Image (spheres, rainbow, N blue to C red):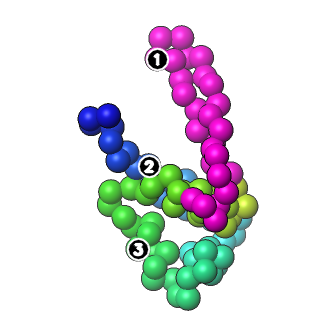
Amino acid sequence: MGATEGLKVDVTKTFKMIMLDKDLKQYEVGQRLGMKDRQPFNRLLQKNDGLRINEVVKIADSMNCEVKISLVDKDTGKEWQCDIVGSVSEA
C-alpha cells in the first residue's frame, strides 16, 4: 500500500455545517455518541491528523446522516458508488 496506508479523512468542516443546518450543538452530538461531556467530542473534531472511517461513520450516524464513498475515474470523471459494509456498532 505504501503512501496510502493509514489514510484518514478530514470532515470536520462538513460535520460543523451539518450541525449548523440541523441546529445541533457539539455537546448534543457528543451525548448521542455516548460521551458524558463535550470535551471528548471537541477533541475528536480537533484531531490534526484526520478521522478514521469508522469514526466518521459513527459521528454521521449520530446526526442521522450516512457516509457515501465513491471512486472517480481521473480521465473520464465516471463515478462508482462504494458500499460501506458493517454496522455502526461494528465500525
Question: Where does residue 7 sit, x and y in percent of width and height?
Answer: 37, 45
Mark 1: few/some/many CA within 10 Å (<14, 14-19, 20+): few
Q: Which of 69 and 16 is in front in this view?
A: 69
Question: Where does residue 66 sit, x and y in percent of width and height?
Answer: 68, 51
Question: Left or right: 53 with respect to 68?
Answer: left
Dominant secondary structure (helix, strand or loop) of the stretch shown in magenta: loop
Q: Which residue is drawn at 63% across and 44% down?
A: 84
Q: In this view, does 38 lie above or below 60?
A: below
Report the residue marked by disc 2.
Answer: 9
- Cα separation between marks 3 and 1: 35 Å
Stretch of the chain drawn in magenta:
66-91
Sequence-first disc among 3 and 1 = 3
**Which amino acid type is marked by label 3?**
Arg
- Cα separation between marks 1 and 2: 20 Å
Q: Is mark 2 on a helix, strand or loop?
A: loop
Q: Is mark 3 on a helix, strand or loop?
A: helix
**Which amino acid type is marked by label 1?**
Lys
Q: Which residue lies furthest to the left in this view?
A: 2
Residue 21 seen in render: no
Q: What element carries label 1?
A: loop
Mark 3: few/some/many CA within 10 Å (<14, 14-19, 20+): few
Report the residue marked by disc 3.
Answer: 43
Rendered image: mark on residue 1: none
Report the residue marked by disc 1.
Answer: 74
Q: Which residue is drawn at 64% across and 46% down?
A: 85
Residue 23 is a magenta residue: no
Q: Residue at x 45, y 55 (%)?
A: 52
Q: Is residue 90 above or below residue 74?
A: below
Q: Which of 49 and 12 is in front in this view?
A: 49
Residue 66 seen in render: yes
Question: Left or right: 40 with respect to 90?
Answer: left
